[in-house]
Amino acid sequence: MNPRRADFERFVADSSDTLLRTAYLIVWDLGEAEDLVQETLLEVARRWPRIRRMERPIAYARRILVNRALSGSARRTRRRQELIAPIRSEPEAAPDRAAEIGVADELMDALAALPPRQRAVLVLRYFLDLPEAEVAAALKCSLGTVKSTASRGLARLERAMRGTNDPRSIPT
Amino acid sequence: MNDQLESDLREALRARAAQVPAAVAVRLAHLDYRPRTRRLRPPVAIGAVASTAAAAGILAVIISLGAGASNAFAGWTAKPTKPTPGQLAAAGAACRRSQSSVAGVPLAVADTRGPFTFSVYANSESTISCIQGPSFVALSQSQSSSPVNVPADQVQLASMHRANRHGQAFGFAYGRTGTGVSAVTLGLDDGTKVQATVANGWFIAWWPSSHRLESAELTTPAGSSTQKFDLPSMPGGCNTNKDCPEGGAVQDMNGAGGHAKGESLSSSQ
């Protein structure tokens, strides 16, 4: 196997799990997350000769993934629902274990209800523990935008956890 | 923002991420994403895949194997058969029930083999394939194609699929034909010949094994010729039912210099 191909296969082996879980958290749908990861890895494959020379190829892959997730989320969700709903009898994901592990249903519901961009920022920040600068790079936006988006997202979650819809109570 | 919320958020995200079955990531890691390092053969050579813009990407493939799946492909024939009265209409209705968007896309071509009907629906925005049989439904949808200009004496492979679901391996292929092509017989890597249905500028066929599509014998006014397909192989070979990875993959061909796209399958029984 040539070194370039070996590098790529190693990258796929190392990154696909994290990319999949990240995608799943952003788009909140396993099937759509699978699509996203495949699309991302295909794009990485096409550009691999250049990407493999980067210091952190995973950061580039993450940026592709996030951009695809945010740009095509609505379209893919509509299409997937059309495709899957009629014939899928069982969810492919494991049953929701939120209750078992003590995470408030309200927080899960609130996360699911967040706009994709806010959820993406929170996922990158609090699941991957990326510094705000890396979140900004992944989203191709400014540091200030990351901070404000994260703040709004957390505020929505806090509002949901408090069980109030009063916008005046939301810190911004 | 309070630390408790951030802590709860981290925990919630970890819990949600833990719902992803490890097998899904493994399956993704084993799909073939390899960068192509060489172009397909040039159009002047017999065996070239026509250089045209093609479908932009498979969006989903869904398979449902119902009761009696062990005999899911019984009745398949290597040559298309004449549809029984009502067979095409019944298949169309089944496909529309399984996927509502079929209703808005005109039928481009239909292939019948015993009790099975393989239909391709296409318009300027999407191409949908549907294989319908007594206990077997397979659907795929790809994004719109650019206008296709296939050389008169060639075919263009648009999509090829192989999978092994619970020991039930199958493959299908479809594409466009040049104006001079009147018949297409697909050749698999085990020597099996599968006569495709050719109509309306399309060829379509499927086969109940995971064997690899290698070539097509074309009938044209000038005689017959063989067109070989240079398809990337699946990791591990995928030349037998045993070897073909569970989950399968779609290879969505973009013509010369194009890439193959891997796609996992969703299934239910």
Image (cartoon, coloured by chain):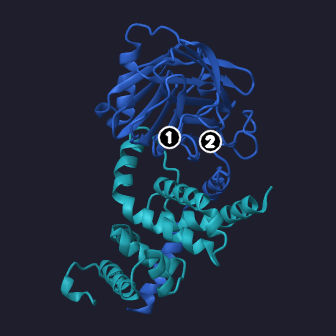
Q: In x, y percent, where is residue A2?
A: 79, 58
Q: Is residue B210 left or right of residue A139?
A: right
Q: Which residue is mark 2?
A: B248
Which chain shows up in blue? B
How crowded is the residue under tag 1: few (<14 C-alpha within 10 Å), some, or many (20+)?
many
Q: Say which colour chain A has.
A: cyan
Name the chain letter of the residue that bears numbered label 2.
Answer: B
Q: Is residue B65 visible?
A: no
Q: Quadrant of residue B238?
A: top right
Q: Is residue A57 visible?
A: yes
Most extreme residue toward the right is A1
Q: Can you say whether B31 is above or below B97 in the image?
A: below
Q: Nearer the viewer, residue B30 or A45?
A: A45
Confirm or deny contact between disc 1 and disc 2 (CB under 8 A). Answer: yes
Q: Residue drawn 56% across and 68% down?
A: A61
Q: Residue drawn 63% across and 53% down?
A: B33
Tell me the quarter of the image containing the C terminus of chain A: bottom left
Q: Earlier in the sequence, mark 1 or mark 2?
A: 1
How crowded is the residue under tag 2: few (<14 C-alpha within 10 Å), some, or many (20+)?
many
Do callouts 1 and 2 point to residues on the same chain? yes
Name the chain letter of the residue that bears numbered label 1.
Answer: B
Q: In x, y percent, where is residue B169?
A: 65, 31
Question: At label 1, which amino acid type do we have?
Answer: Val
Q: Quadrant of residue B96?
A: top left
Q: Nearer the viewer, residue B185 or A106?
A: B185
Q: Which residue is mark 1?
A: B61
Q: Residue drawn 55% across and 71% down?
A: A60
Q: Residue drawn 45% across and 20% down?
A: B179
Q: Can you say whether B7 is above or below B167 in the image?
A: below
Question: At label 2, which amino acid type do we have?
Answer: Gly
